[in-house]
Image (cartoon, rainbow, N blue to C red):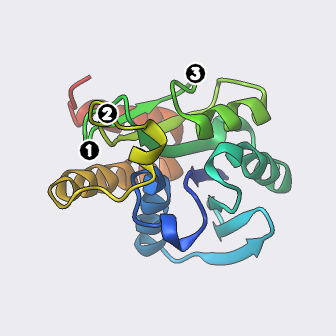
Amino acid sequence: MRAVIGLGNPEPVHAATRHNLGFWVVERLLRARRWKTRVYPWGEVAKRPEAVLLRPFTYMNRSGESALRLVRSYGLPVADLLVVYDDVDLPLGAVRLSPRGGPGTHKGMRSVLSALATQEVPRLRVGVGPPPQGTDLADYVLRPPREDEIPSLLRGVDLAAELALTFIDVGTGGALDHYARLNLPL
């Protein structure tokens, strides 16, 4: 069984923000296949025989608590997780798939890696671009994107969902092969 964890903030006021792109990807996955959904105090879990999806109920900076609960509840090895999140260090709508690494500037991913006590966690990042000069990073990611940014973000989210489904079906190696065939810029 594999798991996709979409990072975001749980309250409806955050639904349309840049910081919730991980949730946007999970929403695409929920529409792509039939899932049985169950709500726990730590997150919403959608399940199929081959996979689970998680939208944490913890805030972004505490995402690791929900990820750890999922791993323990379902007996998942961290190699079978894919964490999906927004990234200000990538251009708007760009998508990057990596089998491991550090959290970069992302506090949600930092929480996940800390809770799981490893950097060997596959991740899928969707670029939101850097904040404009003089704009606070937290303010930037916690605001909805501008109207002209939405098409690029949606293309990135759709591509991320495609890669996440490939991960579910064939694992990290197969998803990386699919990603390489897309010939995306590095």
Proximity of marks 1 and 3: CB atoms separated by less than 8 Å = no
Proximity of marks 3 and 2: CB atoms separated by less than 8 Å = no
Proximity of marks 1 and 2: CB atoms separated by less than 8 Å = no
Q: Residue furthest left?
A: 148
Sequence-first tag of 3 and 2: 3
Q: Secondary structure at mark 3?
A: loop
Distance between mark 3 and mark 2 Cα atoms:
19 Å
Quadrant containing the C terminus in the rendered view: top left
Residue to which mark 1 is pinned: 93
Question: Which residue corresponds to the image point at 46% horizontal and 68% vertical from the top-left?
Answer: 27
Question: Which residue corresponds to the image point at 44% horizontal and 37% vertical from the top-left?
Answer: 137
Q: Secondary structure at mark 1?
A: loop
Residue to which mark 2 is pinned: 130
Question: Which residue corresponds to the image point at 63% horizontal and 60% vertical from the top-left?
Answer: 54
Q: Nearer the viewer, residue 14 or 133?
A: 133
Q: Is residue 51 above or below residue 77?
A: below
Q: Secondary structure at mark 2?
A: loop
Q: Is residue 30 above or below residue 93?
A: below
Q: Position of residue 125 (x, y in %)?
A: 42, 39
Q: Position of residue 103 (x, y in %)?
A: 57, 27
* Residue type, label 3: Gly
Distance between mark 1 and mark 3 Cα atoms:
21 Å
- Is residue 95 shown left or right of residue 5? left
Q: Residues within 10 Å of mark 1 (few under 14, many from 20)?
A: many
* Residue type, label 1: Gly
- Is residue 102 shown left or right of residue 154? right
Sequence-first tag of 1 and 2: 1
Residue to which mark 3 is pinned: 102
Of labels 3 and 2, the one closer to you? 2
Q: Position of residue 21 (x, y in %)?
A: 43, 54
